Image (cartoon, coloured by chain):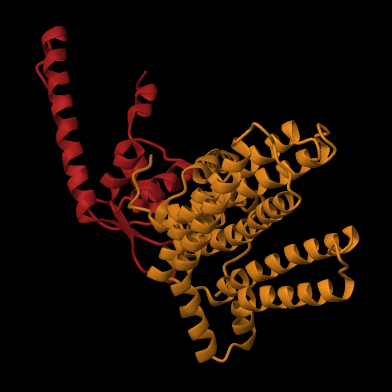
Amino acid sequence: MRPPAAPPLTRAVLALYPPSWRARYGDEVRALLEDSGGGQAAAASLAWRALPAWLWPRRHLHDRPARMRASLATALMSWSMLAGLGLVFAQLTQLQGLTASGHPELRWAYAVFDVTFAASALVAGLGGLPLWLLMLRRARREQRTRDTVYLLLPVIAPVAYLIGLIVTARLAGGANGVSPGWFGVVTLAGFAAAATAAAGPGLALRRLQPRGPALRLAAAAAGVAAAVMAVAAVAIVVAVISLDLYARQFAGYHDGTVPGIYLALVVTAAAVTAVSAARGARAALARPELGP
Amino acid sequence: MTDRLDRWADPPLLVLASLADEPKHGYAITQDVAETMGVRLSAGTLYAVIARLEARGLIEPLESDDRRRPYRITMAGAEALAQESERMSRVASVARERLGTRLGWAGA
């Protein structure tokens, strides 16, 4: 039977609590307020205790698998954007032959980026592979066509992008490659492909709601991959600043606008990746509660 | 002064003590604590305490069709309560003894 509607004041103070807290204790608190007559003092005491409920969430109320799934989806998306930003920058500047004579830190920054990016991708791939295979098997077994497509997007999107890239280069490319306009289109299409590839598993995670050791492994691996990728992000920052300071051909030499926007994007993507992955890894490795 | 001493009462301990004899739901706990221990637990404090004790495995909820879900003390909760009661008993004993010396009490 549906419980009677609570008074507005009760609903208002309960709305201050985290959803998981409300789902667990909301009905009981409403019953208590009905029995005790409620009143403003009771409402005030509940409102006063809402902030600690957010600051120190109780682990028995914490849906760890949901936390891991949400963190994985976010970290995957932001990691892909960060990887795209780094790859475009590293490839473009190295192909253009931009150098900072007398400043070996630029060479080191490229090398560190290459190694850490590869290591991060390897860790993320290996850690996420069991989960991806399990979800794919379940989607196929239960004939969930849409989820199967979502899960295959990390393969479909890059392949489609590469085919588009080859076709574009043949049709629009000249002796010196494609025009700046086409280059912009190809670059944006690359980011769109990366976003699509990352969004697929994220949507599948949301719909299939996997649990268990494979999810924990993926979340823990995402934490490691994000930590390694943070080093790659630092390498990008060092390379951009080096070029901006010492390479005369780079982005309007000493004009910090474009590099500044680029660095802001890199730092934002790195921060989102690190925070999301850390939250997921924390949920994966959580121990019994010791908080206040 | 006596009212102010009420603030020393530890709400988790009061809830554990209330549940020591039988399971109770939220409102029954507040009534019991008020009647037997003289402390009025607000709704916010009560459910903050219940969430904390439940998270630490010191109490557990019982199945209920009613919204008034009863809680019972667990073995770990009973042990924690026994230890704390023993400690408080020692404090009370020392306090009575020393007050007796100072004020000439014969003891409680």
Q: Is residue A122 visible?
A: yes
Which chain did the image draw in orange? A
Give the x, y percent position of residue A29: 50, 54
Q: Which is more toward the observer, A193 or A177?
A: A177
Q: Which is more toward the observer, A268 or A164?
A: A164
Q: Is residue B68 above or below residue A262?
A: below
Which residue is located at x 45 percent, y 59 percent?
A221
**Chain B: colour as depicted:** red
Q: Is residue A35 visible?
A: no
Q: Is residue A130 above or below residue B46?
A: below
Which residue is located at x 41 percent, y 38 percent?
B40
Q: Which is more toward the observer, A237 or B59?
A: A237
Q: Is residue A264 above or below residue B89?
A: below
Quarter of the image with the N terminus of chain B in it: top left
Give the x, y percent position of residue A93: 73, 49
Q: Is residue B25 above or below residue A146?
A: above
Q: How many marks?
A: 0
